[in-house]
Image (cartoon, rainbow, N blue to C red):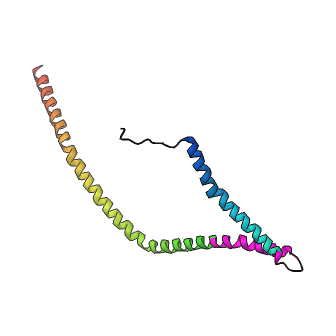
Amino acid sequence: MDPTPAINTLSQKQVNMRHSRERFWQIVFPMAIVLLLAIALAVCLIAFAGAEGVRLGQFSAIAAIVIIIPALAGFLIFLALSVGMIYLLARLDGKVPELAGQLLTWLSIGKNKVDKISDNMAEPLLLFKQFGAQTIQIFNSFKKRFN
């Protein structure tokens, strides 16, 4: 018995059937409902138009309302977000110099600590190189004196 489950247990036919069902309920069905509502609205407008019939002005006014209201709602949301951002930026403007000064102080403290740590870590290596250079210098000076 294999402890790892199979990654894909659905066949291609099952995947296609599932996709068809999802496409119907997510795309075709909502579009059909909207189409039926639009047809019902047109039938109601024609039925209740009265003796003078349907005038083009009524349809244009309705179409303008249907187009303008969602656009205005979207603009209202955009306007609210813009006003909120302007307000927050205005409040932040007074605090930026103070916060920048604090940040610069903390960064300076951090830089000093990093410098001290790196100097302490490099010190043994520098001492080893210094000792090696002194040893070589001693041997070179002995060579010059005895040659």
Query: Which residue occupies the foreground of this view, 74 or 51?
Result: 51
Q: How many marks?
A: 0
Query: Which residue occupies the foreground of this view, 62 or 127?
Result: 62
Q: Left or right of 94: which side holds 14?
A: right
143 above or below 13? above
Q: Quadrant of the C terminus?
A: top left
Q: Quadrant of the N terminus?
A: top left
> Residue 136, image x and y in percent?
16, 29
* Residue drawn where x is 61% and y is 74% of the image: 76
Q: Which residues are magenta?
A: 47-73
Residue 72 sits inside the magenta stretch = yes
Q: Left or right of 8: which side holds 74?
A: right
Q: Is residue 101 visible?
A: yes
Q: Is residue 60 visible?
A: no
Q: Quadrant of residue 25?
A: bottom right
Query: Which residue occupies the foreground of this view, 61 or 34?
Result: 34
Query: Which residue occupies the foreground of this view, 63 or 135?
Result: 63
Provide the major secondary structure of the magenta segment: helix
> Residue 65, image x and y in percent?
73, 74
Q: Left or right of 62: which side holds 74?
A: left
* Residue drawn where x is 76% and y is 71% of the image: 41
Residue extending furthest right? 52
* Residue drawn where x is 86% and y is 80% of the image: 50
Residue 62 sits inside the magenta stretch = yes
Residue extending furthest top? 147
> Residue 64, image x and y in percent?
75, 72
* Residue drawn where x is 59% and y is 54% of the image: 22
Residue extending furthest bottom? 51
